[in-house]
Amino acid sequence: MKNQEVYQFLESNQINASVQRAAIMQYMMDHYDHPTVDQIYADLQPVMPTLSKATVYNTLKLFVEKKAALAIFIDEKNVRYDALTHSHAHFRCKHCDAIYDIPLDKTDVPPFRGSSDFSLSDTQIYYFGTCKDCNDVSGS
């Protein structure tokens, strides 16, 4: 996504577009490996010396609140972030810790059978196992 498109994307999600917010969103759109706050900060701070880790954290929190990004809780050590907000699952390799997007269709999502006392707002589906690269290494 080009810089101008990032600003338009943020504004279309009712997010006031600042240079730092645009840089963080651009980073997420360029890195589909589900980065953490620490990864984003470490990669952007050298080119944006005024960027703080708190700014990255608060920006990602805003993106999630505005549904411009997803918070992924597949890793027990870190919250990961995803710029893809359409319905999909995530797969985490137990060997290399890589996280992959997995397409879903409506038949993959079990129906919510809770009582009418609940109002469902979000569903996240996580799969765990061994990715192809790790299978290839261990199978050699």
Image (cartoon, grey):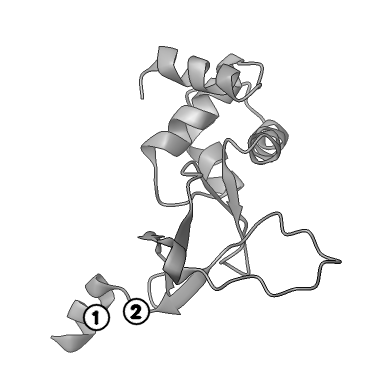
Residue at 43% x, 69% y is: 107
Residue 131's spot in the image, x, y percent?
31, 73
Q: Which residue is mark 2?
A: 130
Residue type, mark 2 in image:
Thr
Q: Nearer the viewer, residue 53 or 116?
A: 116
Residue 117's spot in the image, x, y percent?
86, 66
Q: Is residue 30 visible?
A: yes
Element at label 2? loop
Residue at 63% x, 66% y is: 77
Q: CA distance from mark 2 to mark 1?
A: 6 Å
Q: How many marks?
A: 2
Residue at 48% x, 53% y is: 87
Residue 3's spot in the image, x, y percent?
41, 16
Chain-order first, disc 2 or disc 1: 2
Q: Which residue is mark 1?
A: 135
In the rendered image, the vertical position of residue 22 relative to residue 114, given as above or below = above
The quadrant of the rendering that contains the N terminus is top left
Q: Nearer the viewer, residue 47 or 128?
A: 128
Residue 45's spot in the image, x, y percent?
54, 30
The quadrant of the rendering that contains the C terminus is bottom left
Q: Quadrant of residue 94?
A: bottom left
Q: Which mark is residue 44?
A: none
In the rendered image, the vertical position of residue 17 relative to residue 76, given as above or below = above
